[in-house]
Image (spheres, rainbow, N blue to C red):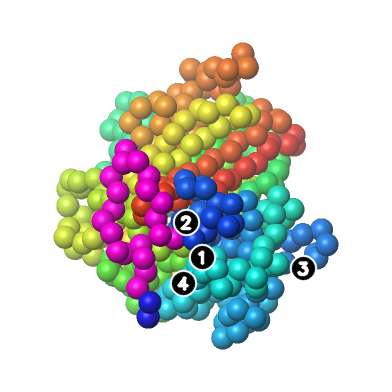
Amino acid sequence: MTPDPDDAGPLMTPGTPPPAGPLDAAASWLGVEHGDPFGIHTLPYGSFTTPDAPGARVGVAIGEHILDLTAAADALLPEHAGLFTAGSLDRLLAAGPTVWSQVRSQVRRWLVDGRYRRAVEPLLLPAATATPRLPFTVADYVDFYASEQHATNLGRILRPDGDPLTPNWKHLPIGYHGRSGTVVVSGTPVVRPRGQLRAPDGEITFAPTARLDLEAEVGFVVGTPSRPGRPVPLAAAERHVFGACLVNDWSARDIQAWEYVPLGPFLGKAFATSVSAWVVPLDALRHARVPAPPRDPPPLPHLDDTGAPPGGFDIELAISLNGHPVSRPPFAGMYWTLAQQLAHLTAGGAPLRTGDLLASGTVSGPTRAQYGSLVELTWNGTQPLALPDGSARTFLKDGDEIVITATAPGPHATVIGLGEVRARILPP
Ligand code: MN
């Protein structure tokens, strides 16, 4: 096996002038500049169609282009060609970590080795000509609640007279099962939902939500399934995870507030959940690993990651509303890690299925400029958010467009991008 040139040198520290890594120079014929979030170290997978060929295809994004893997596989990857003929990531996800690594290495080799240029060039298409599809069939969808700052903010808003964190919060990663059938790909409009609302005077009505909110989250996509009754220990968790995407967990706060007692979120979060079009392999995020914050009290043994490799990810999200930046939530501060969430999810015997989507929960940092939802940014609507165009928001209006992007550090001072999750609100 050829050694990966990424492993040759030490990591660059932030602020160091960016030297071109050995692979960056080789990819220059693609027009990919150093610092492009979809550079040679990212190589995310997605599913797309083009106007001239309506069948779904799998692609890898590189700069402003997409490498058509469905078309490429017969010639360039014959042993794995069948993984891409269906046009979704489902078969690749199910193939497991050895194949993920083989395919990623091979794709990188095509893009950086000049001997493949003549074969690869006809398989590249401008990303702007492609229409994204939901990249994989979502099996079970779970949304966690792993940001201590977000949980604290929500506790202060919803239960001002009690402790902001519930007694269970630091003992287990709280989550709920969502509705996988309403997960949609970036670009899909979101229709303002109707639901039961309770007015301050106690009147119950059925009406469009007046408190439509966003939640900026990171999602992890399960590839390798696990068996029923066989919990996945912390150390094995990441062998089951293919990669990461961005999630906007749309929330109707008024519907949610009336319905959630005592069983938790239901229709207020089930009308739409948006995901980014590109899934970034976990391998692309290995230079972004950071330790999770200290845990107090220590979790029970099956969730205790003391002494384990760093479980967090230094991913910085950015939220914009109608083009105006409103927040930059830091994922690095999340209290519960991906491995702990997988270990907890399977602890009672539930199996993982290929295509399971694990969302992190709203990502919020300690300052207002780092809050990941409008209910926090406007403190439940009491402090409207002023936008540079002179307007203000408490919650979302029809026509508003939310875009969430994210980046993480890569090798050689490069940038790993998670793409974007974008959607506009349509009237009911
Ligand atoms: Mn959420």
> Given the image, on which type of amino acid does mark 1 rest?
Val
Residue pictured at 38% horizontal, 45% vertical: 18
> Given the image, on which type of amino acid does mark 4 rest?
Ser
User: What secondary structure is the magenta-colored segment mainly?
Assistant: loop
- Tell me, for residue 25, which label it has, or none: 2
Q: Can you say whether 302 is above or below 397 in the image?
A: below
- Could you tell which of marks 4 and 3 lies nearer the N-terminus? 3
Classify 10 Å Cα crowding around label 1: few (below 14), some (14-19), many (20 and above): many
Q: State the separation of the CA atoms marked 4 and 3.
A: 26 Å
Please indicate, yes or no, whether residue 96 appears anywhere in the rendered image: no
Cβ at disc 2 under 8 Å from ligand 1: no
Q: Quadrant of residue 183?
A: bottom right
Q: Is 192 or 320 nearer to us in this picture?
A: 320
- Tell me, for residue 112, which label it has, or none: 1
- The residue wearing badge 4 is 105
- Could you tell which of marks 1 and 2 lies nearer the N-terminus? 2
Bounds of the magenta segment: 3-23
In the image, taking residue 40 as reference, residue 128 lies left or right, namely right
Q: Is 284 or 163 nearer to us in this picture?
A: 284
Q: Quadrant of residue 350?
A: bottom left
Q: State the separation of the CA atoms marked 1 and 2.
A: 8 Å
